[in-house]
Amino acid sequence: MSQTQGLLETLAADVQAALGDRVPGVTVAVGELTLHARADAILEVLRFLRDDPRCRFRTLVDICGVDHPDREKRFDVVYHLLSMHKNLRVRVKIETDEATPVASAIQIWPAADWFEREAFDMYGILFSGHPDLRRLLTDYGFQGFPLRKDFPLTGYVEVRYDPEQERVVYEPVKLQQAFRQFDFLSPWEGMLPGDEKAKPSGGGQ
């Protein structure tokens, strides 16, 4: 067992002993610790990880979402924390659905502001207590949430500049069939020996 693996397993045991059923599951694998927390206890868990001297995870690296559309609670909200004092990282996961908001972590880490807005913009994950929960990366009037797995690759609308109206207009996506057919035959194919597309020359093998 590596030293890091041992530290993480000790930390996982300490966290579970302190927080009990608020952290119903832990995983230590490939040098990484993942805590599976209850969504309604997420702020308590995060404060413990930041403030407890055994943890000291004082840097919020990221908050992101993961979409599992076949689950009743389709989203994982994932927090990545760093302890510079102990040179360790931890991942905290909670589950939520499309309608149930997660408590905002801004009061613990102000940097959570933009991370939570990004998760809202990309997945539609809601955060209660966020002072300005609005879209961050998509355009004004954007429809849907582009990182959900049921979001179409083409999107729902496209934008273009209309010279007659002298403004940008939104229109439903239109895919011209002519642009969906491609000839993948490269002009360079057939030039190399052994290419199956090369035509055999006369008189030789």
Image (cartoon, grey):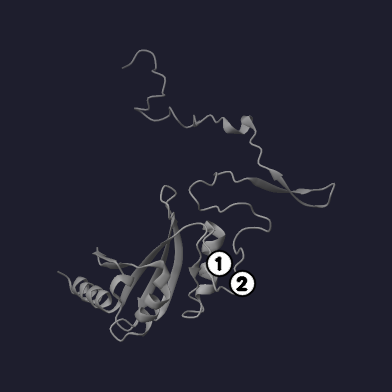
Please provide percent x and percent y for residue 153: 54, 44
Please provide percent x and percent y for residue 69: 44, 49
Residue 57 appears anywhere in the view = no
Q: Which mark is residue 195?
A: none
* Residue type at numbered disc 2: Asp
Crowding near pointer 1: few (<14 within 10 Å), some, many (20+)?
A: many
Closer to the camera, 157 or 87? 157
Q: Which mark is residue 117?
A: 1
- Say above or below: 139 vs 158: below
The quadrant holding residue 178 is top right
Closer to the camera, 126 or 153? 126
Whether label 1 touches label 2, CB < 8 Å: yes
Classify mark 2: helix, strand or loop: loop
- Say above or below: 80 vs 157: below
Residue 151 relative to residue 70: left or right? right
Tell me the CA gap for discs 1 and 2.
8 Å
Residue 166 appears anywhere in the view = yes
Q: Residue at x 57, y 30 (%)?
A: 181
> Quick one: which residue is furthest to the left in this view?
1
Please provide percent x and percent y for residue 49: 35, 79
Q: Residue at x 37, y 27 (%)?
A: 195
Please provide percent x and percent y for residue 119: 51, 63
Classify mark 1: helix, strand or loop: helix
> Quick one: which residue is furthest to the right in this view?
164
Quarter of the N terminus within the rendering: bottom left
Quarter of the C terminus within the rendering: top left
Closer to the camera, 103 or 64? 103
Residue 184 relative to residue 79: left or right? right
- Is tag 1's residue or tag 2's residue first in the polypeptide sequence? 1
Q: Residue at x 50, y 62 (%)?
A: 100
* Residue type at numbered disc 1: Arg
On the image, numbered disc 2 is attached to which residue? 132
